[in-house]
Image (cartoon, grey):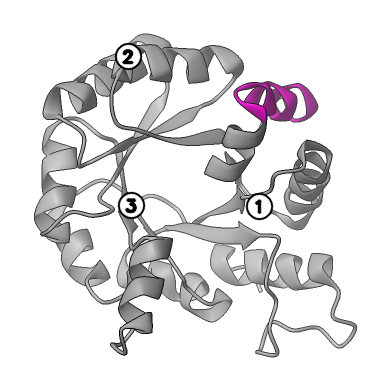
Amino acid sequence: MHKPTVQISLDLVDLDEAVETAAMALRCGVDWLEAGTPLLLAHGLSSVRALRENFPDAPIVADLKTMDGGYLEAEMMAKAGATHVVVMARAHEETIKCVVQCGKDYGVGVMGDNLGCPDMVEGARQLQDLGCGYIVHHIGYDERRGIAAAGNRMPSPLDQLKEVVAAVSVPVQAVGGLSIEQAVACPSYGAPLVVLGAPLTIEADSFQTASGNVEESLKMICQQIHGTS
């Protein structure tokens, strides 16, 4: 069983702010850094290089959401310093195979993302069958808001998380609109890779510190997830 791991998603567009946030996160006990899609769009792979230069030992997930050109994209991310890359289940299976092959060639972990799959559980199973070493069970930003705007209950990755975990034998992470308390609960669903968004939305819940200090709150969250509190 993969031990509980905390990943911070640096969904920021300012590179200096991303590096500062990453430094703070690592001080607090975060395990993995994620160069979020907005950061990659704003700064390209130079954002991954900047994180690698500043944090030489940290695992770095490059969330480029690859849909085509799988080998080249994964190779570019690996050469920039990424330790993990993300390929989409809705890509052609040849693309997924190419990313998996690149992962083997460069020693990079491949995370398969099931966002948009008509059958999320089957999508996760197919990603594992094609060689992905991790599953990202992902309900998208637009999907959540569009369904809620139509007057329906907003979907959550927790809805089918247990089914996804049961369908695969590789580590799973749940992404998409989770509160901090829900994210912290993910390991209890059998999904040990916990993603926290950044900038952190620390709300008035059990993780809120008296001072409202984000760093203190993040430290408490990491302790809770790692089971050391």
Q: Which residues are magenta?
A: 43-55
Horizontal side of 15 relative to 107 (left or right) equals right
For label 2, the crowd category at 10 Å Cα-Cα, with few meaning under 14, some 14 to 19 and many 20 or more, is some
Of the residues under marks 3 and 2, which one precedes in the sequence? Answer: 3
Foreground pick, 26 / 9: 9
Residue 181: name its quadrant: bottom right
Please name the residue that numbered disc 2 is placed on.
71
Do the residues bearing badges 3 and 2 touch, measured as CB atoms within 8 Å? Answer: no
What SS does tag 2 mark? helix
Is residue 155 visible in this depiction of the protein?
no
> Is 223 drawn above or below residue 45 in the view shown?
below
Q: Nearer the viewer, mark 3 or mark 1?
A: 1
Do the residues bearing badges 2 and 1 touch, measured as CB atoms within 8 Å? Answer: no
Q: Amino acid at mark 1?
A: Val
Horizontal side of 41 relative to 130 (left or right) equals right
Q: Residue 225: percent from the left, percent from the top?
A: 55, 67
For label 1, the crowd category at 10 Å Cα-Cα, with few meaning under 14, some 14 to 19 and many 20 or more, is many
Question: How far apart, in angstroms, are the residues tagged by discs 2 and 1?
Answer: 29 Å
Horizontal side of 42 relative to 159 (left or right) equals right
Do the residues bearing badges 3 and 1 touch, measured as CB atoms within 8 Å? Answer: no
Q: Amino acid at mark 3?
A: Met
Of the residues under marks 2 and 1, which one precedes in the sequence? Answer: 1
Is residue 24 visible in this depiction of the protein?
yes
Q: Residue 116: percent from the left, percent from the top?
A: 23, 55
Q: Residue 45: percent from the left, percent from the top?
A: 60, 22
> Is 179 drawn above or below residue 100 in the view shown?
below
Give the residue displayed 52% in from the left and 36% down from the top: 61
Q: Is residue 46 magenta?
A: yes
Give the residue displayed 26% in from the left and 68% down from the top: 161
Residue 88: name its quadrant: top left
Please name the residue that numbered disc 1 is placed on.
30
